[in-house]
Image: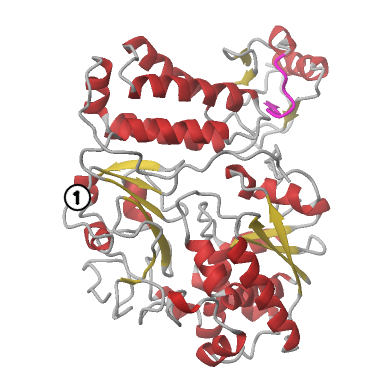
Amino acid sequence: MRVTVDPVRCEGHGICCLFFGERIDLDDWGYAAVDPAPFDDIRLARKARRAVAACPEGALAIEITAASAAPRRH
Amino acid sequence: MTLAPSTGSAVDQGSVDIAFGGVGEPGTRLLAGPEPGSGAESLIAHQARLGAWPDFEADRRALLDVLDLSGLRGRGGGSFPAAAKMAAAAGRGRPLLVVNASESEPASAKDATLVGLRPHLVLDGARILARAAGAEEVSVVLHRGNRPGLRALSHALSERARAGLDDPEMTVTLGPDRYVSGEASAVVSLLEGGEAKPRFTRRRPAALYGVHGRPTLIYNAETTAHAGLLARFGAQWFRRAGTAERPGSTLVTLAGAAARPGRVLEVMAPVSMGLLLGAAGLDQPPAALLVGGYAGAWLDGATTWDLPFSHEALGHAGASIGCGLLGILPPGACGLGETARLVTYLAGESAGQCGPCVFGLAELAAIFEALALGQASRADLRRLHRRALGIEGRGACRHPDGVVGLIQSALRVFAPDVRRHLKGRSCGATGGPIFPVPPTTGGWR
């Protein structure tokens, strides 16, 4: 899975970065810059879901990638 | 203009008998027919010149086959295979066919030429593609500023109605004169009655989820014009022009320091850039070439001179045919100054929706202007590189990516000028602006 950001909706609140700093960074103007690398770690998946839920604009989504249909426990 | 095609090309044996030609010149395909001065070709003249419809027109399977075998690729810039787009939309409900003639590149004139002079060829192709897709409606999208195009199309549609042609329902929609409003998702938004701004679609292409959720097949006007011919003359005929990778002829617009900027040529075979630029009045390599559009790429003039004009050769050199723009930077002009003007224009054409595009492009434009004026430091240059990489791929559409590509190619091709400008020295450039930049107009509908 991976996180994607809708750049039209993103208003740069920056909350996602607090929840999921492992994959979401803020750019110089405060907008979410998401690392597109897929992950299947259950701990990261939990953080990703929190970040998605916390975005006040509903700009984030979790995308299921072909490589990992469901998160695995390591 | 009759010249031998360059040897060693990937074209079928004994392919085409000219390398390139302009409107009305013999041996051309899309541009064949009356001279440019005679205006839009009438329906009667068009049908007399090209003959009747192919008798398999009603056979959808046969149309799809000929489209597939032809290898036709989209001519709006993306070069996406036309048949694959249609296959993606198949079986998903009532499709809509869109002819995208909203030519947003300020220096490009190929779509305006086709729509203005050969409207029936564009509409024939739309009809053929609609039949192949099972679409009963066709929308032709134009920029509002293209008044001659609207006149030619309206007249052509009334001629077809009077002649009782069994066309799908065809309508014309006018969009704003903005750079990004010809992008596929922006066209979908316009056709839904919204603003012609790109949308973030999360891998939901218009071909599958388009206007009001319907599969929407958006083809560039040159693509549909090709379809109008290849349905008549067949896939083998079509492949005799162009290359194996990108079959068929290609329209290019000459811009900048050309004898006649805005002149449109049809390239039949992968002729060398040098010969092609000879048609622009050049007998020696220009300082540099802007290829594919304002958000395209700069190529060095001397090394590009002997390259064939082909999808493959330009791709290898780091550019793409894009919309077919060939912009000529003359010796003595400042490539950095030109790039700064283009970047400032493109930054102003952001739809203002995505933070990285709004703030990123504005900052890139400011740094690049400072660089062009000899007021930038090495730290500014490092910031330019960092910012460019930082915004790539982060817009709803590819507009920021296009600007980043332009900037990166400029820093590569004009590297010696960059060093001079960083030292605050004049690059010695003289003369006014080379490429036209229209004023940014407000409004998105």
- Report which quarter residue B336 is drawn in: top left
Could you tell me which secondary element the residue under label 1 belongs to?
loop
Q: Residue at x 25, y 15 (%)?
A: B424
Spot occupied by residue A74 in the image (x, y as percentages of width and height): 67, 16
Q: Residue at x 23, y 67 (%)?
A: B6
Q: In this view, does B48 lie above or below A50?
A: below
First to last magenta residue range:
A1-12
Which of A47 and B420 lies nearest the eye of the viewer?
Answer: B420
Q: Residue at x 54, y 81 (%)?
A: B41
Which of B183 and A16 lies nearest the eye of the viewer?
Answer: B183
Q: Residue furthest top?
A: A18
Quarter the N terminus of chain B occupies: bottom left
In the rendered image, which residue does mark 1 sit on? B285
Q: Left of A16 or right of it: where is B414?
A: left
Q: In this view, does A27 lie above or below B23?
A: above
Q: Is residue B7 above or below residue B401?
A: below
Kind of residue indicated by mark 1:
Pro
Give the prevailing secondary structure in the magenta stretch.
loop
Confirm whether the magenta stretch covers residue B288. no
Q: Mark yes or no: residue B278 visible.
A: yes
Spot occupied by residue B61 in the image (x, y as percentages of width and height): 67, 78
